[in-house]
Image: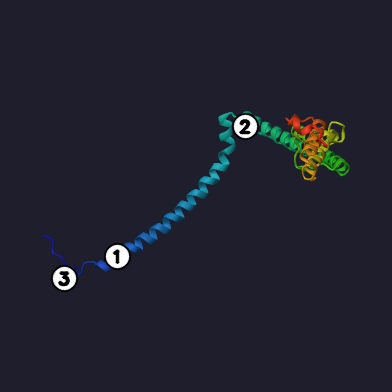
């Protein structure tokens, strides 16, 4: 039988608040130490990895394939750079010829006085056909109205005005109808005029 000494029998158990403090201390201390160990291990692993890199790649026997990728990427980058330079050159050329084109159209517009708003941002030559069609229509219409055929509408307007003057002239109904008949005939307008209205009045 083991007999405990008097001092050991008098020891008190760990109280709850002391237990919490001890647990907190243990966790903090071990967490700090674990972080130090992990950091040391990470540094050592990184150092060893760098030393083993060449041997690792050699073991894979894939260096030539990796170099082929690098060469292909270099060729593509060079092409893209050249492509961008060519594209910029062609874009500048397009901008210049578009400006020259619309400058010429504006000069024509000062002379011809077209009713048309030029879209100078339009660089699609296919859409120019719509513009040319609209301008040609204006030119054709203007020329037509200036031709003998185009005078017909103005003549017709004058004949209408004459007919209106006749009916308000205060003349006899017979004379009004007779004069209207002449105007209708000149305007090539078919009209049924009462025959008795065309007869001369008896004296």
- In the drawing, does residue 47 fall left or right of residue 33? right
In the rendered image, the residue lying farthest to the left is: 1
Q: Using the numbered discs, state the Cα–Cα distance from disc 1 to disc 2 in whole angstroms.
A: 58 Å
Q: For the residue carrying disc 1, how many other residues have a C-alpha within 10 Å: few (<14), some (14-19), or many (20+)?
A: few
Residue receiving disc 2: 66
Q: Using the numbered discs, state the Cα–Cα distance from disc 1 to disc 3 in whole angstroms.
A: 28 Å
x, y percent for residue 142: 84, 37
In the rendered image, the residue lying farthest to the front is: 203
Q: Residue at x 49, y 52 (%)?
A: 40
Q: Residue at x 31, y 64 (%)?
A: 22
Q: For the residue carrying disc 3, how many other residues have a C-alpha within 10 Å: few (<14), some (14-19), or many (20+)?
A: few
Q: For the residue carrying disc 2, how many other residues have a C-alpha within 10 Å: few (<14), some (14-19), or many (20+)?
A: few
In which image quadrant can residue 135 be found? Answer: top right
- In the drawing, does residue 192 fall left or right of residue 145? left
Indicate the quadrant containing the N terminus: top left, top right, bottom left or bottom right.
Answer: bottom left
Residue receiving disc 3: 6
SS assignment at label 2: helix
Question: Quick one: 148 or 78, which is closer to the camera?
Answer: 148
Q: Residue at x 16, y 70 (%)?
A: 6
Q: Earlier in the sequence, mark 2 or mark 3?
A: 3
Instruction: Indicate which disc residue 146 carries.
Output: none
Q: Earlier in the sequence, mark 1 or mark 2?
A: 1
Q: Using the numbered discs, state the Cα–Cα distance from disc 2 to disc 3 in whole angstroms.
A: 79 Å
x, y percent for residue 89: 80, 38
Residue receiving disc 1: 20
x, y percent for residue 201: 80, 36
- Residue 65 drawn above or below residue 111: above
Residue 77 visible here: yes
Q: Residue at x 57, y 38 (%)?
A: 53
Question: Quick one: 32 or 193, which is closer to the camera?
Answer: 193
């Amino acid at each position: 039988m083991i007999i405990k000494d008097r001092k050991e029998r008098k020891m008190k158990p760990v109280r709850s608040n002391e237990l919490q403090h001890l647990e907190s201390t243990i966790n903090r201390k071990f967490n700090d130490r674990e972080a130090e160990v992990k950091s040391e291990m990470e540094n050592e692993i990184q150092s060893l990895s760098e030393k083993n890199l060449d041997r690792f790649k050699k073991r894979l026997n894939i260096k030539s394939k990796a170099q082929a990728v690098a060469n292909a990427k270099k060729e593509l980058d060079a092409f893209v750079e050249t492509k961008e330079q060519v594209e910029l050159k062609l874009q500048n050329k397009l901008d210049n010829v578009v400006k020259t084109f619309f400058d010429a159209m504006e000069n024509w517009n000062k002379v011809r006085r077209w009713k048309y708003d030029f879209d100078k941002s339009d660089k699609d030559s296919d859409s120019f056909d719509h513009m040319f069609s609209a301008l040609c229509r204006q030119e054709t219409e203007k020329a037509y109205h200036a031709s003998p055929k185009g005078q017909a509408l103005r003549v017709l307007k004058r004949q209408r005005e004459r007919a209106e003057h006749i009916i308000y002239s205060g003349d006899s109904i017979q004379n009004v109808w007779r004069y209207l008949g002449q105007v209708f005939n000149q305007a090539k307008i078919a009209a049924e005029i009462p025959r008795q209205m065309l007869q001369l009045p008896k004296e």
